Image (cartoon, rainbow, N blue to C red):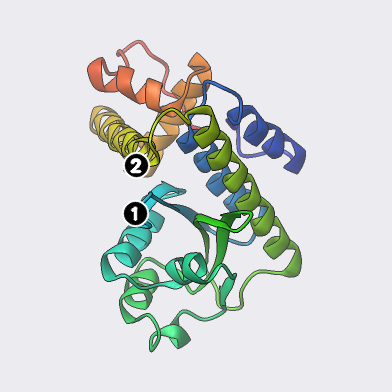
Amino acid sequence: MFANEGESFVEVFVAIADTLQTGHDVIDTMDVLVRGCTMFTAAIAAGILLADSSDVLHVAASSSERASDVEEEQLGAHEGPCLDAYRSGATIEVPSIADARGTWPAFSDIAEARGYRAVHSVPIRFGSQRLGALNLFLAEPGGLSGRDAELAEAMALYAANSVEQHRKFHSHIALRDQMKVMLEDRVLIEQAKGALAQRYGVPMDEAFGLLRAEARRMHASLRDTAAKIVVRPLGDGQQKMIS
């Protein structure tokens, strides 16, 4: 995972490749991907939705609490560009969220309320198999540049490879059970974020930075680090670290 916000493009993909090694969870890779999107494109936030065996989408990663709110609203309202990208298998470009209100009213309302003005949604596919979708949110209307759009496609491809590799490695476990474990891991991570936010009096996004930093220090997955924090929060002598 990232050591700081100043890494080069190559270092980011090295970090992504590292998460594909045994011992890291899908959530770790998705987290690196969404943060990479915000570091190297015009997007100010990003999120990833992944489908379970019943074709139901779930939030797998988000770069911020605001992005998570928007993703959850899409799922609750059963509408939004990320869902359409997943269903159609095609990239959905929305240069103006305000102009898309007639298509996705609930999504448009919360996206604009959270400060987003444009969105770029890329399907996550492995061959012909639909796995999910990647959302990139922009602060200004206009959409992504050609270069940024290509990078988003690359991030979606890495996401697909990560999911497929994880499924093959755990092929002895039913897909629905794999997704159940991933969702339970996300709940655990949210609990750890809440514990850190309360302990240090910081926002949830900053608490997530603390969690990432501790995972990096321990060379552990986000899930394993979160489990330790929920059971035994960082001690008073632990240096506060922000990624």
Q: Residue at x 54, y 33 (%)?
A: 168
Q: Is mark 1 on a helix, strand or loop?
A: loop
Q: Which residue is denoted by mark 1 in the rendering?
A: 54
Is residue 168 rendered to the left or right of residue 222?
Answer: right
Where is residue 219 drawn, in percent x and y?
A: 53, 17
Is residue 162 rendered to the left or right of residue 69?
Answer: right
| Mark 1 crowdedness (10 Å alpha carbons): few <14, some 14-19, many ≥20 | few
Q: Residue at x 38, y 36 (%)?
A: 174
Where is residue 233 drawn, in percent x and y?
A: 27, 18
Q: Residue at x 37, y 41 (%)?
A: 179
Res. 176 mark: 2
Res. 16 mark: none
**In which quadrant is the N terminus drawn?**
top right
Where is residue 40 drawn, in percent x and y?
A: 67, 52
Front residue of 138/153: it is 153
Label located before the other in sequence (1 or 2): 1
The answer to whether the residues at label 1 and label 2 have Cβ atoms under 8 Å apart is: yes
Q: Is mark 2 on a helix, strand or loop?
A: helix
Where is residue 133 drawn, in percent x and y?
A: 50, 58
Front residue of 171/152: it is 171
Amino acid tagged 2: Arg
